[in-house]
Amino acid sequence: MTTLTVIKATHRRRTGRSLVVTVALAGVVAALFVLTMMVGSFRLTAWQVIASVLHLEANAGVDFVVRGLRLPTATTALTVGLALGASGTIFQQLLRNPLASPDFVGVTSGASLAAAGSIVFLQAAGLVVCAYALGGALLAALLMYVLAWRDGVSGYRFILIGIGIAAFFDGLIGYVLSRARLTEARQAMHWLTGSVGQASDSELRVLLYALPPLLLIAIGLQRHLRALELGDDTARALGTRTESSRAALLAVAVLLVALAVAVAGPIIFVALVAGPVANRLLGPATGGIAAAALTGAALMLTADLVAVHLLPVPLPTGVVTGAVGAPYLLWLLATTNRKGVGG
């Protein structure tokens, strides 16, 4: 058996496993999406939910519960999870560090500062807060990119600068909250906790329109992302324009996380966890953006189910993801330190 034959056989196995895992994850996400609309004080069957969503049957009571009350929240969890999962794995692969999540490198903190400032100082609400959060995330990412540039962008330097900017922004958020009146502080804290139930129809519509093209662009850039993982010299040898590809991938990842945070607030740890979980499922075919996005959606839908229906008191989604994600972060820090990666 020649080397070329072995390479082709290995490629077919990896492609096959990637396809099977991605399809299975899509099925799990679809099931969770329906399940979130079945449970509640008014329980529904799976067929009632599907028939209402797809307009297959006319039932005013069921349509009101499904389309009016539950579908917006389920759609927010789905789309925010997809965006965070894809963004998180792009950051981790591009910066070659499992701790390189948008939660920790300043993007989420920039969005939070801008949103909290608009609520406290401008009494903003709804789509205006969404716009400020989006702008804050983009400005934070641009600031990090400029400060990290030294004849190119090093992943290690980008992460350190991002952590510093995140700490600075978090301090400013504390100052903003200290200047707020009680009602504004409560509103800002609710937004900063992160919840899929707080998005308005107009905010959700922005994410629904922007998400499909951004995901398609990210998947289209996956070949360049795999090349950049091998190092800049190897990527250049493979014909990849390193800096333009890196800038494009960072721009897509930042837009994804900025839109997600603008719609649902800073829901932490989903972007950090989705990529590694997807890689465990993919095995040798690691690094799939579609699989990571679907894993993020599954995590978000599950967290929303737990937060609303399985706890004695309903809680914001961000509380559940934080409670689950913090132990994972400690485990990740311990294991990466033992392996000698991650700094």
Image: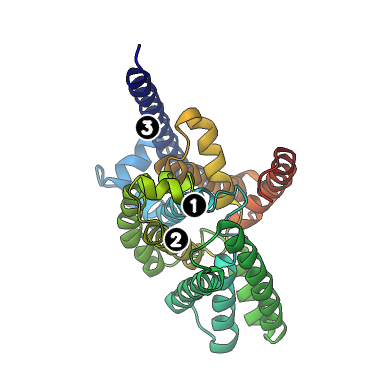
User: Could you say which is closer to the camera, residue 101 or residue 298?
Assistant: 101
- In this view, the mark in front (3 or 1): 1
Q: Earlier in the sequence, mark 3 or mark 1?
A: 3
The residue depicted at 51 percent of the width and 52 percent of the height is 88
Q: Which residue is mark 3?
A: 23
Q: Which residue is mark 1?
A: 94
Q: Which residue is mark 2?
A: 250
2 and 3 marks in contact (CB < 8 Å):
no
User: From the viewer's perspective, is 279 left or right of 245?
Assistant: right
Residue 23 percent location from the top left of the image: 37, 32
The residue tagged with tag 3: helix, strand or loop?
A: helix
Judge whether 96 appears above or below 159 on screen. Answer: above
Residue density around tag 3, few if under 14, some if 14–19, many if 20 or more, within 10 Å: some
Query: Mark 3 belongs to which amino acid?
Result: Val
2 and 1 marks in contact (CB < 8 Å):
yes
Query: Mark 1 belongs to which amino acid?
Result: Leu
Q: Quadrant of the N terminus?
A: top left
Residue 38 percent location from the top left of the image: 46, 42
